[in-house]
Amino acid sequence: MLRIARAHVDAMTAHARADHPDEACGIIAGPIGSDEPRRYVPMTNADRSPTFFRFDPTEQLRLYREMDDNDEEVVVVYHSHTATEAYPSRTDISYAAEPQAHYVLVSTAENGAGEGPVEVRSYRILDGVVTEEELHITE
Amino acid sequence: MAVEVRIPTILRTFTNGAKAVEGGGSTLLQLIDDVDARNPGLKSRLIESENLRRFVNVYVNDEDVRFSGGLSAPIADGDVVVVLPAVAGG
C-alpha cells in the first residue's frame, strides 16, 4: 500500500495536466527506509514526448546528489500517460530500476489538460512483475 | 591516485555491495574494462554493441559523457565517475 498526502496527489495531477499531451514525470523522496513520500520533485521529461519519458540526466544527477546528502531515497516515481490508462507499459516495466519505489501512474487520457477526473494508480515493479497496490490518500 | 566510480544500488551485486570502486585508464572504455576485470559482469550492464547502453547515464566530474565523447571520453586520475540508471519509461 502507498500512503500519500492529498497535496502530493494534487501536485502530480497538476503537473500531468500542465504537460499534456506530453508525459510528465518526477519523484517524491523520503527518508531512507521510511517508505514515506515527503519531498515532491517534478522533473523535466528530456524526451518531451507523448509516448515516452526520461528524466533530464543533468537534473537527475543533481537530485540524486541532494538525496544522498539528505539521507533520502526515491519513494515514489510518477509519470503520466496521456492517451492510455494508468497502467505500466512494457517500456515502464523494462526500465523500472528502483526496486524500493512505488510507481505511480497518472492518466490524463480522459480529460487532457482540462479539469475533470484524472486516474491515479500505484504499482510495485519488481523483476519485471507488476503488482497494483492500494493508494491511501491522507488529508 | 585512481578514478572513483560510484555504483548505483541496482548494480552493486557486481561489486560485492560496494557503493564505489576504483579503477584506471585514459578513456571511459579503458576505465570500464579495468573495473570489469575485478567486478565481472559490470561492463555488460553498461555497454551494448560497443556503445553505452541507452538507459544508463554516466557522468565524469558531473558532466554527462554523452556530450563529451561517450566511451572515448578522456579520464584522468582523480576524476569521479558516477553511474546512474536512467529513470525512463513510456
Image (spheres, coloured by chain):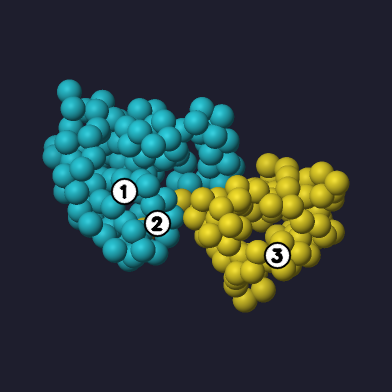
Chain colours: A cyan, B yellow
Q: Are marks 2 and 1 in contact (CB under 8 Å)?
A: yes
Secondary structure at badge 1 equals strand
Of residues A108 and B66, the one drawn nearer to the viewer in this rendering = B66
Mark 3 is surrounded, within 10 Å at the Cα level, by few (under 14), some (14 to 19) or many (20 or more) other residues, namely some
Whether marks 2 and 1 lie on the same chain: yes
Q: Disc 1 residue type? A: Tyr
Whether marks 3 and 1 lie on the same chain: no
Chain letter of mark 2 equals A
Q: Which residue is mark 1?
A: A103
Residue A50 position within the rendered picture, expressed as x and y whole percent measured from the top left = 36, 54
Of labels 3 and 1, the one closer to you: 3
Mark 1 is surrounded, within 10 Å at the Cα level, by few (under 14), some (14 to 19) or many (20 or more) other residues, namely many
Q: Residue at x 39, y 28 (%)?
A: A39
Q: Residue at x 58, y 41 (%)?
A: A61
Q: Residue at x 57, y 35 (%)?
A: A65
Mark 2 is surrounded, within 10 Å at the Cα level, by few (under 14), some (14 to 19) or many (20 or more) other residues, namely many
Residue A135 position within the rendered picture, expressed as x and y whole percent measured from the top left = 18, 41
In the image, taking residue A112 as reference, residue B45 lies left or right, namely: right
Task: Report if residue A16 is visible in the image.
Answer: yes
Q: Which mark is residue A96?
A: 2
Quadrant containing the C terminus of chain B is bottom left
Q: Disc 3 residue type? A: Arg
Query: Does A113 appear above or below B67?
Result: above
Q: Earlier in the sequence, mark 2 or mark 1?
A: 2
- Tell me the CA gap for discs 2 and 3: 27 Å
Q: Quadrant of residue B49?
A: bottom right
Q: Disc 2 residue type? A: Ala
Of labels 2 and 3, the one closer to you: 3
- Tell me the CA gap for discs 3 and 1: 34 Å
Q: Residue at x 70, y 64 (%)?
A: B38
Secondary structure at badge 2 equals loop
Q: Which residue is mark 3?
A: B38
